[in-house]
């Protein structure tokens, strides 16, 4: 079966603020709802490709919508060829750089284009990419926890079948982190994997001190201990806290950002954000780098699309389960006994139009 020659007819962008199943509290601020930009790429044969951008804050939503509207005329009438459109958009933004708003929109449009192709073939994206849908062991991703009120969340997570848990730390002093992780480890038991995320909150020296104090809690990894762009700091922390693995990558912009981090020796592992890495096209380049560098690969949020990409990644490791868009979908992608499995066709995304209207941002 040949891939149909689709042509982009229209691009739509709609901002929503979707309620989260639980708040995401981080050392850098709390995310109580998910500001999302829903993108639809309509084609000449009636197939629509869908994807969403995570805007992090409502302050960016109007600007992102306008950005999509401004770029749309450059793409309408062109073929749904993700690699060709990626080269076109790279050229458009060569002098500005593919970060921030430009990178978010380019990565999301790329996902929508791949979704359209896979839907036109009536296959899941993982299959279109030459792989197959397979079950992925997941960890349940939490924000910062209050041991007095939030431990039942952990108990419920473990009872549902999750074999790994991630929590965020770093907002308080070292003793506070020790007290929290003590209660968390007691709650989940010794057989459940435990990951920590500092959300870029520490200095190099502070990160080393904290991780050394926490290393006896059997940590699977410690994530973004220092500022994401501080590759030297990440390498220094990594060298000083061995054997605790350092994880980073969710803020690598496009494959070149990953290449720079690998060259700097900034991480033992790799965590890819499909929006920031350049959509499906960027992810494929990134997963090849991970394979060449023997880096275990994980995803950052975007569970629906990431389930397809992790299924084809040669070094796929733990899958992050953090549902940010389920409230505006016809069907949430839910874990079963701690396992996540992609669905199709395409990325398996269908908007619940009633919910989109209800949570529309204006």
Image: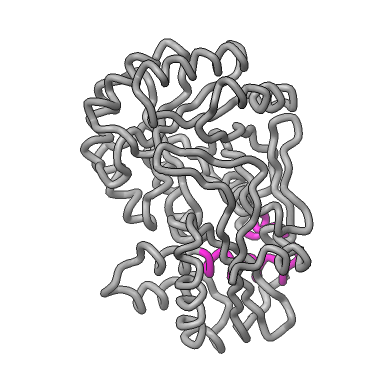
Name the side, left or right, on which 82 lies relative to 222: right
Name which residue lies at 72% across and 65% down. 358
User: Does the rendering let one see residue 301?
Assistant: yes
The quarter of the displayed image where residue 59 is located: bottom left
Chain part drawn in magenta: 108-128
Find residue 332 and report its horizontal and vertical position in percent: 74, 50
Image label count: 0
Give the residue drawn at x 69%, y 74%.
Answer: 48
In the picture provided, is 318 more to the left or to the right than 169?
A: right
Q: Which residue lies furthest to the front in this view?
A: 148
138 over 57 or under it: above or below: above
Side of 231 relative to 74 (left or right)? left
* Viewer-proximal residue among 94 and 153: 153
Specify whether 293 is left or right of 76. left
Rendered residue at 58%/77% (across/down): 80
**In magenta segment, residue 96:** no
Residue closest to the eye, 214 or 35:
35
Asked where in the image residue 201 lies, by quadrant, the reply is: top left
């Amino acid at each position: 079966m040949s891939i149909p020659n689709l042509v982009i007819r229209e691009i739509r962008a709609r901002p929503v603020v979707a309620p989260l199943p639980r708040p995401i509290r981080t050392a850098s601020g709390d995310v109580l709802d998910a500001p999302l930009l829903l993108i639809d790429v309509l084609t000449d044969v009636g197939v629509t490709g869908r994807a969403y951008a995570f805007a992090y804050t409502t302050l960016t939503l109007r600007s992102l919508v306008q950005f999509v509207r401004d770029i749309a005329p450059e793409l309408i009438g062109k073929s749904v060829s993700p690699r060709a459109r990626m080269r076109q958009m790279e050229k458009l933004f060569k002098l500005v750089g593919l970060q921030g708003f430009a990178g978010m929109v380019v990565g999301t449009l790329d996902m929508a284009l791949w979704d359209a192709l896979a839907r036109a073939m009536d296959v899941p994206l993982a299959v279109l990419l030459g792989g197959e849908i397979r079950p992925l062991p997941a960890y349940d991703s939490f924000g910062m926890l209050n041991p007095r009120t939030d431990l039942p969340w952990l108990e419920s997570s473990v009872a549902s079948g999750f074999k790994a848990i991630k929590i965020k730390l770093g907002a308080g002093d070292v003793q506070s982190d020790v007290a929290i992780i003590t209660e968390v480890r007691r709650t989940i038991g010794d057989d459940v994997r435990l990951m920590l995320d500092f959300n870029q909150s520490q200095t190099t020296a502070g990160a080393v001190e904290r991780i050394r104090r926490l290393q006896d809690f059997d940590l699977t990894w410690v994530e973004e201990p220092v500022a994401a762009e501080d590759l030297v700091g990440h390498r220094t922390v990594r060298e000083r806290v061995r054997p605790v693995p350092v994880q980073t990558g969710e803020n690598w912009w496009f494959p070149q950002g990953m290449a720079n981090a690998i060259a700097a020796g900034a991480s033992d592992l790799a965590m890819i954000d499909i929006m920031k890495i350049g959509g499906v096209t960027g992810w494929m380049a990134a997963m090849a780098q991970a394979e060449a560098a023997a880096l275990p690969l994980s995803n950052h949020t975007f569970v629906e699309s990431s389930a397809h990409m992790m299924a084809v990644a040669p070094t796929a490791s733990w899958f992050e389960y953090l549902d940010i868009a389920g409230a505006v979908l016809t069907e949430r992608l839910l874990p079963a006994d701690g396992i996540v499995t992609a669905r199709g066709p395409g990325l398996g995304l269908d908007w619940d139009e009633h919910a989109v209207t209800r949570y529309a941002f204006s």
